[in-house]
Amino acid sequence: MSGDASEGDVEVEEVVDPVTGQAIQGESRWPMTVAVLVLMAFALAASPHLSFFPGPLLALTEGALLLAILFGDPGRIDRQTPWLRRTTVALVAVLLASTLASTALLVFDLLTASPVTDQPGPLLVAGAKVWLGNNVAFALLYWAFDGGGPAARAHGMPAYPDLAFPQQTSPDLAPPGWRPQFIDYLYVAFTTANAISPTDTMPMVPWAKVAMGAQALISFAIIGLVLARVVNLFQ
């Protein structure tokens, strides 16, 4: 731990895996950063009727929280501080709230046969944006909370996982010291949305089960209602 770390600040130059005894690095910040930038772009490009919050204000809020995280823990993710944890949770909450609000507005428009859903092309584009935004937001949720978050995972995996990846249930499938990274959670989110159920990664704790169940239900509603409306428009 660095000598000038403040109270409650856990920062190490080298993280040693308790299983292998070898030094490991925290995961790269860039995949998560790109995911947040994509959602910021969606916020700026979203149609007004699908935005509960003003797009520029939402993107500005997300960008400010992201910059705070990047400056607080640049490079690889391995720094554990209460304020960084709270900032990460706040960013995920904002992203998830905005995508869920867009989903609710889209479903409302579809159920009420709003005029904005009368053109199949724009409707498919809007539905795809909302669907993709939800998947990325849920990926960030899984990434931020599984095992205490990426910084906590860099310092050691919990004895009992929140999300059980195949590499954890069958350790022979991965090298010693394997840890899930953002791309793994992105895969979990998209496969859950496509299959409308968990696939190869199982939720083991209540919050993970609720999150996966909610994501599957949201994906089912978006795909089912959008496709039904588009088919109806062509009849």
Image (cartoon, helix red, strand yellow):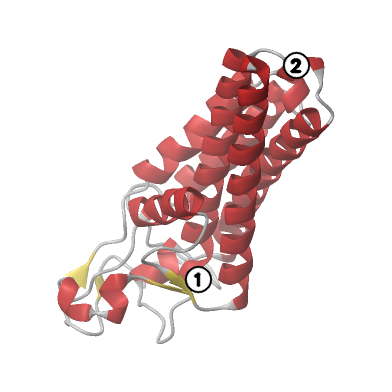
- Image depth: mark 1 or mark 2 in front: 2
How many marks the image carries: the answer is: 2
Quadrant including the C terminus:
top right
Which sits in the foreground, 27 or 45?
45
Report whether 132 appears left or right of 228: left
Residue 193 position in % (x across, y down): 50, 50
Q: Are marks 1 and 2 in contact (CB under 8 Å)?
A: no
Front residue of this view, candidates 15 and 50: 50
Where 224 falls versus 166 (above or below)?
A: above
Residue 63 visible? The answer is yes
- Which quadrant holds the N terminus? bottom left
Q: Earlier in the sequence, mark 1 or mark 2?
A: 2
- Residue 33 has which mark? none
Residue at x 64% of width, y 48% of height: 218
The picture places residue 183, in percent across and down from the top left corner, at: 34, 50
Q: Residue lying farthest right? A: 112
Q: Which residue is mark 1?
A: 148
Placement of 101 over or under 161, stated as above or below = above
Circle 2 crowding by C-alpha within 10 Å: few under 14, some 14–19, many from 20 = few
Dot 1 alpha-carbon crowd within 10 angstroms: few under 14, some 14 to 19, many 20 or more: some
Q: Please identify the quarter of the rendering in which residue 103 is found.
A: top right
Q: Quadrant of residue 83?
A: bottom right
From mark 1 to mark 2, how far is it between C-alphas?
Answer: 42 Å
Q: Is residue 44 left or right of residue 31?
A: right
Residue at 56 percent across and 29 percent down: it is 129
Report the residue marked by disc 2: 116
> Hey, what amino acid is under mark 2?
Val
Q: Amino acid at mark 1?
A: Gly
Label 2: which secondary element: helix
